[in-house]
Image (spheres, rainbow, N blue to C red):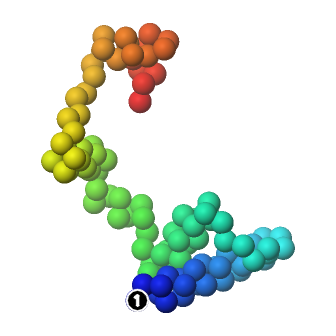
Amino acid sequence: RLTAGGAKEVEHLLELKKADVEASGKSYDGNYYLWDHKFYDRLMIEKEYSIDETKVADYFPITSTISGMLKIFEELLGLVFVELKDADRDALSPTGKGQDIV
């Protein structure tokens, strides 16, 4: 059941890519690469559903979203996440500066 819908969506994404590439004055090779997907999928969502991802992101503050995701991973996968502070981060950093570690 999903195959037909997926094929239809890929066709639509190919059409979007073709229009975009030709609008920029380049020749379209007919291929849809893995690295094309995020761009053209976002373009399709913006055009067809009038969804602005930046406005949606306003409802999901990064700090609470990451914290919530980590809690889910802890419960589902039995993981434990511990925030490293100052000296511990410094010890792990190749430069000795903990702020280098993201």
Q: Residue at x 27, y 19 (%)?
A: 85
Indicate the position of residue 6 as horizontal and vertical percent values: 49, 82
Indicate the position of residue 46 as horizontal and vertical percent values: 49, 74
The image quadrant that residue 67 belongs to is top left
Q: Is residue 5 above or below residue 100?
A: below
Q: Secondary structure at mark 1?
A: loop
The image quadrant that residue 91 belongs to is top left
Left or right, 93 with respect to 74, comes to: right
Q: Is residue 94 above or below residue 8?
A: above
Q: Is residue 78 above or below residue 84?
A: below
Indicate the position of residue 70 as horizontal and vertical percent values: 24, 44
Indicate the position of residue 100 as horizontal and vertical percent values: 46, 22
Quarter of the image where the N terminus is located: bottom left
- Under mark 1, the amino acid is Arg
The image quadrant that residue 37 belongs to is bottom right
Visible in this render: residue 12?
Answer: yes
Q: How many residues crowd around disc 1 within 10 Å: few (fewer than 14), some, or many (20 or more)?
A: few
Q: Residue at x 42, y 74 (%)?
A: 51
Q: Residue at x 67, y 71 (%)?
A: 32
Nearest the eye: 50 or 95: 95
Quarter of the image where the C terminus is located: top left
For mark 1, what is the residue?
A: 1
Q: Residue at x 78, y 70 (%)?
A: 24
Visible in this render: residue 71?
Answer: no
